[in-house]
Image (tube, helix red, strand yellow):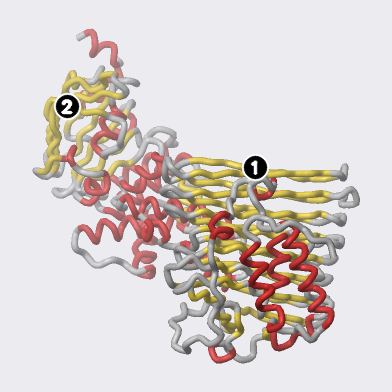
Amino acid sequence: MVQTAVQTGAAGFLHRYEGLRARLPGQGLPWLAALRERGIAAFRAQGLPTRRVEAWKYTDLAPVAQAAFEEPLTAVDGALALPRAAAPKRVVFVDGRYRADLSDAGAPVRSLAAHLPAAEGLLGSVARIDDVPLAALNTALFEDGALIDLGPGEDGGVVEILSVTLAERPVAVHPRHLVRLAEGAKLVLIERAWGHGGSRALHSPVWEFSVGAGAHVTHARLQQEAAASLHLATTFARVAAGGTYDSFLLHAGAKLARSEAHVVLAGPRAAAHLNGAQLLADGQHGDCTTFLDHAAPDCPSRQTVKTVLSGKSRGVFQGKIHVHQVAQRTDGYQMNQALLLSDQAEIDSKPQLEIYADDVKCSHGATVGALDETQLFYLRARGIPEAAARAMLIEAFLQEAVEAVADETARAALAEAVAGWWEKVA
Amino acid sequence: MLKIEGLCAEVEGKPILKGIDLELPAGEIHAIMGPNGAGKSTLSYLLAGREGYEVTGGSVTFHGQDLLAMEPEERAAAGLFLAFQYPVELPGVGNANFLRTALNAIRRSKGEAELDAMQFLKLARTRMKALSMPEDMLKRGVNVGFSGGEKKRNEVLQMALLNPSLAILDETDSGLDIDALRIVADGVNAMRGPGFSSLVITHYQRLLDYIVPDRVHVLMDGRIVQSGGPELAKQLEATGYTAVQAA
């Protein structure tokens, strides 16, 4: 075996893998052991991404590289104050581990750790393990996650997956979630990342979505981690002909958050919605990065991402759309807008279109602005106090992105997270 | 009720108001007429508390309080209402939500109970009917996609709901056809009474056929150069502002 030099910030994670390897779930399964080895080799070769890597130019992982993370406790005290459920069925993970005692029965969600043989052929089939270091690391280290496998035409209903990170200690958790929808299946998934405690904990989930022909999945991610936490999420989705991956990302919590999505429209008329909103207060860094591959003809994609920044915060939007030569009649739309509420806030916005087909409709736009003083005055002249007037205009700015979420439950959960944000930070 | 004394103001270092004296007693409607650039809009924005105007002299007293020391929302809570010449569009803010938030903010400041969604809708529907406004204007974004006449009616609707003791109507007649003008004037006339005063700011006499003022003041080059009864408006219409300037 060729020995590769250890890259920046990787040492702690590599060490952890060596220590854990024998105890990781599924080590008796040769295919999984091999996959984990492949993951750790890829991570060892690349290390944590640095700002020298083009896709990481605006987000510095030094806080992750420098941290000394601890293992999550194997058993957690049962008395946990959880947020109100956003969906009729909720499944709870604490520090990355499935908690049957906190979860509702009847949801189409199983513990990955408890059903690893069922994940063969699915785990690693959509994720890019070899060239996305965080996916590689997750593949090596994951201990549990959600496994959702819907048969042809099956309707999984509306499900919430709540991931609680107990940031009382600087734990690092790397859950792996797998979602497969067979032909014509349906699912609305509300994923909430939530935490408490004041230490620099890391929650770094990886999602793999395999969306079958004509299947439809809504994936609403609400990132509401504890204030000092680090959140690094990577989502992979592959959508077959006529299927839809309809996603929304909310970044509201954490000190440093990056959500990266890699979506491949693999069959004709496959559709993707990659909408999002980032609400960043003083000291927060939020990064929404997406890679969208139009790899088949007649596929529509829609993306509206809005970022609100206050205090000394920093927002990043990177949206790459790659239209392959076969992807004729692609209909792509991308819009990202930022609202700066302070002179010290910074937004870096990088739309990137690479088009190799000739019959394509692709539009994109970006705006950066402050609150409109005339609008603010109009509201105040009607007796609405300044903080409430600002909150109304901020919610109005986000409205377009929130309205793009078709499912009512998911939209309501989002609207609730967005409402009153300004009055809380102001 | 409203007392303006020696009011001087600048915009970006340029003097616009050059010593305005005006007293508006409770229950009266006064018109302020004047040519473009006389300072009419500056006066109305200044009274409502918009930023960007520097008061360089004089005072404004409203119900015995120093108006110029108050925030815009405090002025509104104290009973001042400005009907905008150019009502502002608020995409993403529903009209119903806007109207109810404003109404409840005013009610709260008066120590009155807030209205819930049902109570508000009932009240709004009654007021809208009187202004011949279609009900779907509640569902749309504030002033978004409204015609000029609809925007002005929406201003009058806000006035009717917020029930101010002083309404400043800034060129409310501009862009209105005769039917809309009549509806708007009816809306203002319906509020007339001992507890309601209004400053009707206009370029043309036309509106004053429908809202008959108690007094008319002519504002030119930042000063009130002439005051009189309603007949002054008619006279101005016949002779034009240049005749006043020459006098």
- In the image, B81: left or right of A33? left
Instruction: Look at the numbered disc 1 and give the secondary structure of its residue.
Output: strand
Position of residue A19 relative to residue B1, above or below, is below
- Kind of residue at badge 1: Gly
Q: Name the residue under label 1.
A: A365
Q: What residue type is labelled 2?
A: Leu
Instruction: Please give left or right for residue B227 compared with residue B156 in the image.
Output: left
Q: Which of A315 and B180 is in front in this view?
A: A315
Residue B69 vertical position relative to residue A176 in the rendered view, above or below: above
State the mark number for residue A147: none
Q: Position of residue A296 (x, y in %)?
A: 87, 57
Residue B28 screen position, x and y as percent = 16, 40
Name the residue located 19 percent from the left edge and 49 percent from the top edge: B78
**Residue A256 rendering spot, x and y as whole percentages:** 53, 58
Residue B7's disc is 2
Q: How many marks?
A: 2
* Residue nearer the viewer, A210 or B102: A210
Chain holding disc 1: A
